[in-house]
Image: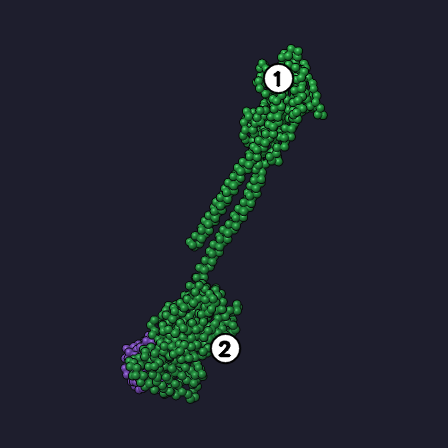
Amino acid sequence: MALNDNIKTVVRKSRGTGLLLVFVAAAMLEATTLIQYLSSQRMLKREASQRAESELRATRNQIMDVVDQAEAAVHNSIWIARWCLDYPDSLVVVSRRIVEENPSVMGSTFALVPGYNKNHPLFSPYVCRSADGNIEIKSLATEDYDYPSQEWFTEPLNYGIGYWSEPYVDTGGGNVLMTTYSVPVTDESGRIAAVLTADVSLDWLTDLIGSVRVYPNAFSVLISRDGTIMVSPVEEFNMQRSIQDYAKGARDTANFNILASAMLTGKSGNLVLGQRRRERTSVFYGPVEKTGWSMAIVIPDSEIYGEIRRMGVLVGILMLVGLSMLILILTATAKSQLKYAEVNEKKERMEHELSIGHNIQMSMIPKTFPPFPERKDIDMAATIVPAKAVGGDLYDFFIRDEKLYFCIGDVSGKGVPASLLMSVTRTLFRSVASHEKSPQRIVTLINNAMSDMNENDMFVTFFCGILDMATGHLRYCNAGHNPPLIFTDEVGMLPVLPNLPLGVMGGVHFPEQELDLACDNALFLYTDGVTEAENTSHEQFGEDRMIAVLRERRDSQGHLKAMEKAVADFVGSAEQSDDLTMLFIHYLNDMKPDATERHLILHNNIQQIPQLADFIETIANEMRLDQSLAMSLNLALEEAVTNVILYAYPAGSDGLVDIEAIMGKDILEFIISDSGVAFDPTAAPEADISLGVEDRPIGGLGIFLVRNIMDTVSYQRTDGKNILSMTKKL
Amino acid sequence: MEVIINKENAVTNVRLVGRLDTPASQEVSEQLEPIMANASGTIVLDCTEMSYISSSGLRIFLSLRKAAASQGGKIIVKNISDDIRQVFMMTGFLNLFEIE
């Protein structure tokens, strides 16, 4: 149970550890992806910034080209203009030349400072290109216009240098966006005499700026010195609103103000507008020199990072799916592990129960070795190594009336059902063998009992033997079991008849066989678990290997240990496939060579009884038995013989009683046989010696005395003879 | 087997000499028939010289004992040897008889 808890804890722990590992791995993956993502973002930002800046530069250069052109046109005309100061009528020529020679200059005027020429207090001829391309000349010196108060006129005079006006929409020439470059013109004395201008159309700016498309949804904005939006994608704003205005209404006013002031002060740089991630916009800005303008390229972050964000989302989803799968797999594994632990627990419980079963079984069979330590005439050992916790093999043995009853069996099948049948078989053997004296009867009775109740078509191969310990006479009956090995001078197989196993069908006749064992002969009984033990290459242990192990001289316990080891070595890492059961019987009664026999044959006449006394006296003398033992033996023998004379032969018939005395070293056996009618004196009821005088029957004491005096008494009917055998240990 | 019967007053003395085996028992049984028929007195079975007894001999003892019991007599077993005492003990006869 403690082990089990450990397994569960380990599983739980490992499940926790597993999850933790997954999360760590996921976090690392996430971090890697994030780093990659961030660095990609940085790279994209850098790329966007580079593209924007180069675009800014290019656009600015293009603007500067026009601006320079205009400035050059004006500056190049100053000397002529100065020369013409004294001839106002020729001034128009200067302007005309500027317009004619510079396609980007839409108009030009040469405006005299009021009062410079006494004849022309106000003088400003204006040369311009009309919509159809013709040159037109008009005068700006009108009261309505009041050119001296116009910005293009005042500012150059104030600064004394060339001045780019704020852009404006020229209503006169067809709503054209214009800007004017005006330069003060000094006369030879250094006095400012006039202002020379060039009006530059800015329509191209709209196209130029509009064509700047760093990204599909990016756009550019050009603002003037005072913040007026000159060009932007929103036409309503153009020339109508200033960046300052716009900043007030913008969502991210703070940043917008920073941007506005940076642009208005002619700085270059970049800035991110918008607080929400989705609304963020990167603005790259830089000044346009000379004009005081500032240009900005606006790129929504979604444009810059759109691809990587989409990829990020995709990667995120993929990772989520992957992680979910990983967690699912891990959970499933953990569950199966937990289940495994539960199954293990069940298995353990079952194994525990099976081991109880095994203990019960083992307690049924004799397993103390040597089983008869006081006996010198037998050396026995037996073992069962079950393949599963409880097995279907059995052996059993016991000594009754100086005879060794023994059996070995192998129940078909394995596991619990086999073991139950094994218990049944063993119980039957014990109960049947306790009163039956021939292996044939024992096997037949067990078979009948088993066949009656066998509903599961299981059967038992079974070998049963009875060894007369005094004589070495072995009677046996085989029911389909492997023939045991017999060790005489040679190792050989005990000849067995191929009878059916037990439990196949009732009423079957099982013939009996017999054999005499000499001293030092031995029997080895085994189940096929020994010979059919398989190694990993599916070779079987086989009889040859088995016999080879047994050829060495050992005691029976040693033989079995050697065999177990040999089989285990042979099997190696392969699983034990069947029960391994062995029974070794070493017969060591050396009575026979020394034994002497005495024979006495009597007629079925009571008057011959006294001859028994002489017979016993002879034996007693030979065996040096004391007088009282001799008397007891005489009594037992007389009672047994009297029984034969009185009951085996019908009155008046003639018959013989054969009395054989076998004198062993420390045992005396009488075998009394006759050819009379079947009569089993041992079947007589036991006399009750506790009864009082009145109740006490007159007879029945004869066999009672025999049983009391002798150590063993056994009867058998063989070949039409009653054979009563009785022994007395000396 | 020799049986010597000696009657003194109410006491019948029966001396059993030799081996009381099965054939002997048949003879002894016949000889003791008159005593068994009249067993109201005291019968002393003197076993001093009895060297052996079989179950048929025991049967005679038991028959006498039953006869005495039914006729109000009394059986006294005298001087049994150790070996025979052993047999008596084995068979529970020590409890059935008065043994001197």
Image mark count: 2
Q: Chain of mark 1?
A: A
Marks 1, 2 in one chain: yes
The answer to whether residue A687 is visible is no
User: Residue A556, how many percent across, how many down?
Assistant: 37, 72
Q: Give the chain coloured purple.
A: B
The residue closer to the viewer here, A470 or A44, is: A44
User: Residue A175, how many percent across, how many down?
Assistant: 68, 24
In which image quadrant can residue A99 be found? top right
The answer to whether residue A29 is visible is yes
Q: Which sits earlier in the primary sequence, circle 1 or circle 2?
A: 1
The residue closer to the viewer here, A155 or A160, is: A160
Type of amino acid under label 2: His
- How is the rendered protein coloured? by chain
Residue on which the image places disc 1? A82
Is B78 situated left or right of A533 in this image? Answer: left
Mark 1 surroundings: few (<14), some (14-19) or many (≥20) residues within 10 A: some
Q: Give the chain coloured green.
A: A
User: Residue A676, how many percent across, how many down?
Assistant: 43, 85
Q: Residue at x 39, y 73 (%)?
A: A550
Mark 2 surroundings: few (<14), some (14-19) or many (≥20) residues within 10 A: few
In which image quadrant can residue A60 be found? top right
Residue on which the image places disc 2? A509
SS under mark 2: loop
A412 versus A13 height, above or below? below
Q: Which quarter of the rendering shows the N terminus of chain A?
A: bottom left
Type of amino acid under label 1: Arg
